[in-house]
Image: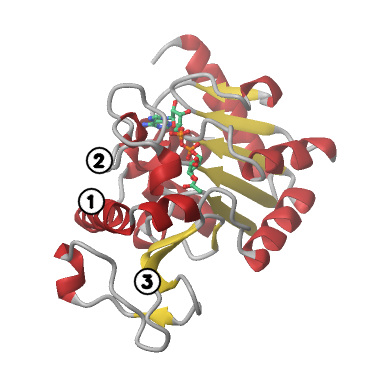
Amino acid sequence: MDAELTRSLATAADLLARAQAVAVLTGAGVSAESGISTFRDAQTGLWSHFDPQQLASQSGFAANPGLVWRWYMHRLAAVEAATPNPGHLALAALERQTPHFTLITQNVDDLHERAGSTRTLHLHGHIARFFCNTCQAPYTLHPDDRTAPMPPECKFCTGYIRPGVVWFGELLPEREMWAAWQAADTCDLFLVIGTSGVVYPASQLPVRARRHGAPIIEVNPEPSELSVMADICLRGPSGVVLPQLLMAIRGR
Ligand code: OAD
């Protein structure tokens, strides 16, 4: 481990050990080591093969519901086959040792929950939940739906069934967003992990935390849009850095 990372880990561990209220924002990077592609990786990112507007928007769904359905079924299978990595596990452990801990995620997978996190806010929904795009009635996925060429139809109104994720141009879930603002406004430390920080309003959460004086710690192998406001940047994959951080807290 290089000397700068060791120093930064020690400072971050001190801040975390003293913090009473910690808010965390995670993005696709935290699930990358579980084998789920991030969104904006030039080589392997999901959207290097597809047009995001086509896959994650009302207009795209209207234009090609079969393509959108098949893509989400592919994504769902990848999420179900994945297992939490040491980064997810370290965050669950951090929750257990922090008096007030809120984990805000932009991820639509359930790897944080499977790792043991209990106070999780999903700003962009859940890939394994479904509802009717027309009447919003909830829908339970049937095994045949997974290989179907088209989305299933709603039994109440014959509208198409869609995944419970937030698409471009749609509003974020109000209750989760409100709770996320609250956590950002009241935390005494904010962690930004594995996100490029380019998608609003999630990207504003650390700005809000910073405004009332909470230090910001970033964990990301690469600089992001949010790096400029970070007090400490831990440059490395979250599956490596977060367990190191946990050890540094325990070794104080
Ligand atoms: P991005 O794909 O934009 O960014 C992933 C970030 O993870 C990048 O900054 C990478 O450097 C970093 N990263 C890669 N591997 C990592 C690792 N092992 N450990 C830590 N960090 C790593 O994904 P998001 O920021 O999550 O929204 O994207 C935000 C939103 O954009 C998504 O939730 C999605 C998309 O629009 C919706 O679908 C509504």
Q: Which residue is mark 2?
A: 35
Q: Earlier in the sequence, mark 1 or mark 3?
A: 1
In the displayed structure image, the side of residue 150 where residue 123 appears, left or right: right
Residue 159 versus residue 100 in the image, above or below: below
Q: Which mark is residue 66?
A: none
Q: Quadrant of residue 87?
A: top left
Q: Earlier in the sequence, mark 2 or mark 1?
A: 2
Q: Residues within 10 Å of mark 2 (few under 14, many from 20)?
A: some
Q: Amino acid at mark 2?
A: Gly
Q: Amino acid at mark 3?
A: Tyr
Instruction: Using the image as rendered, state which of residue 147 and residue 38 is in the foreground.
Output: 147
Which comes before the other along the chain, label 3 or label 2?
2
* Residue at 37% over, 26% down: 41
Q: Secondary structure at mark 1?
A: helix
Tag 1: amino acid? Ala
Q: Which residue is mark 3?
A: 160
Check whether the beta carbons of the residues at disc 2 and disc 1 lie within 8 A of each other.
yes
Q: Residue at x 74, y 45 (%)?
A: 188
Residue at which label 1 appears: 78
